[in-house]
Amino acid sequence: MSGNWIVHAAQVLLVAIVAVFVISPIVRRRGERAWSESREEGLRRSIAERKGRLYTGIIELDFDRDSGKISPEDHERMRSEAMSEVVALLKEEEAFEKGPRLRPAVIEGGDPVERMIEEYKRSRRRDPGARQT
């Protein structure tokens, strides 16, 4: 009977430890700084990610041709399709960059180091004659 009680106590203790482990990040991070990405910043990030994927795809196509995985004709066709996508994406990026570049909105609170960095940046904007490091 006493051995059974120890097993139940160990199970309850294990469940409590797991619950604390799962819930503690949620409770501890309450009130910390959170970035709110604007629509423009999200679009900018999306364009950069697509551009990176396209460039990587072109490099992989060249490697596949050099290693003999695809024929030169297929390589040329697929590379020209990828390059036309890159050109379209670069035009989209150029059109988007003509607009004003906004900084993401910041919800204050949380990490003291991040607050210090933001305060430093604000002071540099207010005092443009400050010494550059």
Image: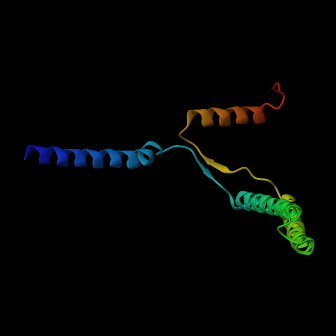
* Residue occupying image coordinates x 44% and y 45%: 25
Q: Which residue lies furthest to the front in this view?
A: 68
| Quadrant position of residue 126 | top right
Q: How many labels does the image show?
A: 0
* Residue occupying image coordinates x 55% and y 37%: 111
| Quadrant, the C terminus | top right
Residue 36 falls left or right of residue 73: left
* Residue occupying image coordinates x 40% and y 44%: 24
Q: Where residue 45 sits in the image (x, y, percent)?
A: 73, 57
| Quadrant position of residue 131 | top right
Q: Where residue 120 sits in the image (x, y, percent)?
A: 70, 32
Q: In this view, does 25 lie above or below 112?
A: below
Question: 9 or 93, which lies in front?
Answer: 9
Residue 14 falls left or right of residue 46: left
Q: Where residue 112 sits in the image (x, y, percent)?
A: 56, 33
Question: 36 or 128, which lies in front?
Answer: 36
Question: 16 or 118, which lies in front?
Answer: 16
Q: Is residue 131 above or below residue 31?
A: above
Residue 66 falls left or right of residue 105: right
Q: Where residue 60 sits in the image (x, y, percent)?
A: 81, 61
Colouring convention used in this rendered image of the protein: rainbow
Question: 68 or 5, which lies in front?
Answer: 68
Q: Which residue lies furthest to the left in this view?
A: 1
Residue 100 falls left or right of residue 40: right
